Image: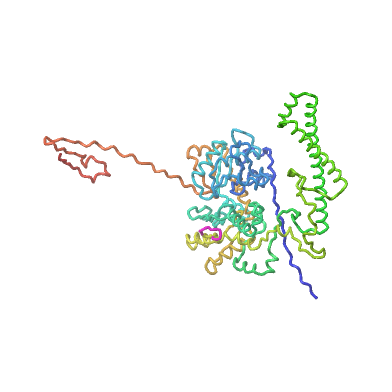
Amino acid sequence: MATKQEPVYQIFTFQDCKTTPDPIFELPAQCLAPTSAPIVIDNGSFQTRAGWAAPAAEFDSPRLLFKSVAARCRGAARSETQIGNDIPNLEPLRWLLKSQFDRNVVVNFEIQELMFDYVFTHLGIGSEDSVANPIVLTEAPCNPLHCRQMMSELLFECYRVPHVSYGVDSLYSLYNNSTRMNLQPPHTGIVLSSGYHCSHILPVIDGRFDAVNCKRVNVAGSQAASYLQRLLQLKYPGHLAAITLSRVEELLHEHSYTAVDYQEELEKWRSPEFYEREVHRMQLPFSGKVPGGCVSVEERQERRAQQLRRLQEINARRREEKLLQDQERLDRLLAVQELLEDGLLDHFHKSLVELNMDSAEELQSYINKLQLAVEQGRQKLLHSDGVEGKTEVSELEQPMDEGDGVALIDSDFPEDTLPEKPANVVQPLFNMAEYHQLFVGTERLRCPEILFQPSPTGEDQMGLMETLQYVLARYTPEQQEALVSNVFLTGGNMQYPGMKERVERELLAMRPFQSHFKVRMASRPALDAWYGARDWALQHLPSAEGGAAEGWISRQDYEEKGGEYLSEHWASNVFVPMKITKPVPARPTEPSVTTLTSTGASAAVTTPASDLPPCCSTVAAHVTLVSS
């Protein structure tokens, strides 16, 4: 007879990775001679990556990778700011974290300066007055001129760098992957980029970024993380504090996937067998002690016996303390009575006043009461030592200390008041481990789905593929064919399993019948931007004489053309100069000649038409008479 196979559960534990501080590297000699090697900084809104653009094998990867956050208390010194990997655990300091970004645009340049200090210090640049290396820096598509102006001012004025080059991270990623695949420039295609704060659709025509038709979608990784956190907190209200943003991001990166057909995938989750097989049980940390859990009769009796023994010890200690206090007070009263017997009346009356007594009779009455109380206390101590198990709670005149932690138990309370369950009755055990498990089912695909359907999060805008269709509609059919023949996916939020297949399915439904398209995924969606910027810097080094070089902004360019100036190259934004309309000063007009007539009338004579400028030649000369 075949036995029913038990379902296989997938139980995972949160890694809760703790970051370690980045080491401070020594400045490599090959980065200074014969020329200064450029420093490549991928300034991402989620993670910053920095390294050297040098041909040596040891510089093939970024040396620094850290989250773009800074923890700085109000009023704290600049040196006390924690940045990136200096923060081992983000959750206790979540309310202190600050970023230089507003969505994907740098607006807080005080934090940006702290980020640059961190990068330059850990790369080994110890000079305080300037940085002698050129800088390659990524920026957002269609970055506002004011933000670029402030960034250039920070780099040229504060750090006195010799050259700066700006480029779009998604285009650098396209550049790197096209170079690795030996695709001949100029490239034509469309880039779908999704990062931490927003997603972009970037058309590239003949190797140049078409900034006029690019679009941004304000849905990306941070919105997916917030949505998943809300879903899990509504599902498990008892674990609100345990469902932190760091754990939610781990769930997104390690356990989520993109459904090729969203509705069909949801139908699969209706099956109990599919649910048990695919649900991910995330184990939260917990303590094995169960307060008030089910214990056996023997354990309960043993605990009660321990409480009785401890209570007896407490009662005996309190009786001894009370007996000592009564004995000391009795000895003092007897000493005062001896003063009366010795005839020292002055000292006797003074002592009575201190004791708040009026006469010797009152003193004698207190002495008799204390002698009786001391005798009774001694008898009770002897009785408690001889007889075990009897406690008299009524004699505890003062409340117990809070540190004792044991409730007083009346010795006369019958033990059989509470009915005991039979020992052979099987009581259900409380599975503490299962109580601290998060069953992550459809949430695994619902959160990445907001990239295509943002409406569940409350965003009133188009999804990524709808926006792509809108962008393609702005081109001719021939250009559309060229664009969709090279659809490139990049960005950290594009790393979900099934993302490429989902985009291909959406394009198949979007494009005309029997049309061709090709979708490529970046080899390292989160890191290819840095590698592309490094490759570009190695092939386009700035001139040593300080002259003009393609893609580089020199200090002379900054001083002559302003901070918003951009030297364009293959992976850069399009420079649109800022047009400032200056008011045209009005021409001074000749004063009118006013003549007074003898009858009190005045005549205002204006300039004849022949004396006016050409633009005003149509105005005829005239004389106006005004009667008084």
**Side of 401 where 162 appears, left or right:** left
Is 600 situated above or below 576?
above
Image coords of residue 116 (percent x, y): 60, 40
Residue at screen point 76% across, 71% down? 4
Image coords of residue 118 (percent x, y): 63, 40
Is 85 situated above or below 290?
above
Q: Quadrant of residue 622?
A: top left
Q: Quadrant of residue 484?
A: bottom right
Q: State the residue lying farthest toward the left.
A: 599
Is 327 situated above or below 14?
above
Q: State the residue lying farthest toward the bottom.
A: 1
Image coords of residue 40 (percent x, y): 61, 44
Along the viewing direction, whichever of 87 and 411 lies nearer the viewer: 411
Along the viewing direction, whichever of 471 and 287 lies nearer the viewer: 287
Q: Which residues are magenta?
A: 455-461
Image coords of residue 579 (percent x, y): 42, 45
Can residue 40 be seen in this snapshot?
A: no
Number of disc labels: 0
Can residue 180 be seen in this snapshot?
A: yes
